[in-house]
Amino acid sequence: MEEQDHYRGRGALDAFLNLFCLITLAWTSIAAGLILFQIIDKFLSPEKLYYYNEFSQVGLKIGIASALIVTPIFLLVINFLHRHYKNGVLSHQSGVYRWLTYLVLLAAALNIIGRLIQLIFQFLDGSYTLASVLKILVVLLIASGIFGYYWYDLKRTDYSQPSQISKIFLVAVAVIIIASIVGGFFLIDSPQITRMKKRDQERVMHLNNIRSIIASDYINVKTLPAGLSAPKFSSNIDPSTNQLYEYRVIDSNKYELCATFELPAEDPSKLGYISGENWDYHQSGRQCFEQTVSGLDAKPLPPEAQIIR
């Protein structure tokens, strides 16, 4: 009774610190998983266009940003909570702590079971790849680490002395996160390259929009536009120059579109793809594409036939 009176009124603080620990730990785990997944995809998944690739610059950057902010918060909060246990401010035998810890154990256990089922199914189904197996192992490692630590912490009775197991766990978390962040920084594009890629994506979208407008109009009027100065084309301009794209009528149902791209969007040697058949698979620099209204198959003209507007 006396012990209950000692901790009375501290349930809110207990719940806040424990929930904060669990949420930041989960967030840290997700961030580490994001980074490691993208590293696996970078080296083991087939390369495609830089904006249709399994490897995601956005996912990697979100993971790095989350890990940089959330991991230090988790380490600070859990040390603060353990210091309260050591000083007797809070009790590690409280109902709040035990309920939340059991929920973490349940979530981690279900995650482990689910990933083991997924791993065995992929082997039996023959649908596994090295990348998919490594991703499952990453999740298993993270979930097993969380389960093991909280199972130990649940059985721990003495917070008056530092725990070597707790220290090992927290140091392991810090080392894994730091190594993941460092590895991720070697793979992410610089802000300048990212901006260049985004502008090239805009150009591809604009060329698709122009092609769709021309095709739609051709169905009704049976003629190609003389230029791109009409208001319906006004939103499709080069993001760097703010100028209309180059356009030239070749025949009654053929025309040419040209755009200047800042980066190549494919690696033909890895894709087994002949570069230049479509503006999605463009090289850097000025590229021109001949379009037929009926089929709308993009075929670039040879350099000697490219006409500057």
Image: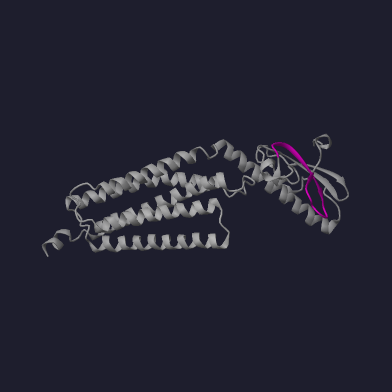
Quarter that holds the N terminus? bottom left
Q: Quadrant of residue 103?
A: bottom left
Pinpoint residue 268: horizontal percent, then vertical percent: 69, 42
Q: Count the marks.
A: 0
The residue at the far left in this view is 2
Identify the residue shown where x is 34% and y is 48%. 74
Q: Quadrant of residue 23?
A: bottom left
Give the side of residue 236 with respect to residue 124, left or right: right
Q: Which residues are magenta?
A: 283-299
Is residue 285 in the magenta section? yes
Give the side of residue 91 with respect to residue 103, left or right: left
Is residue 115 in the magenta section? no
Vertical comparison of 130 with 275: above or below: below
Vertical comparison of 204 with 190: above or below: below
Quarter that holds the C terminus? top right
Pinpoint residue 84: horizontal percent, then vertical percent: 21, 51
Vertical comparison of 32 with 9: above or below: above
Q: Along the line of sight, which residue is nearer the eye, 249 or 42?
A: 42
Residue 103 appears in the rendering: yes
Give the side of residue 146 with respect to residue 253, left or right: left
Pinpoint residue 62: horizontal percent, then vertical percent: 48, 47
Q: Along the line of sight, which residue is nearer the eye, 60 or 218?
A: 60
Identify the residue shown where x is 39% and y is 54%. 26
Give the side of residue 56 with respect to residue 92, left or right: right
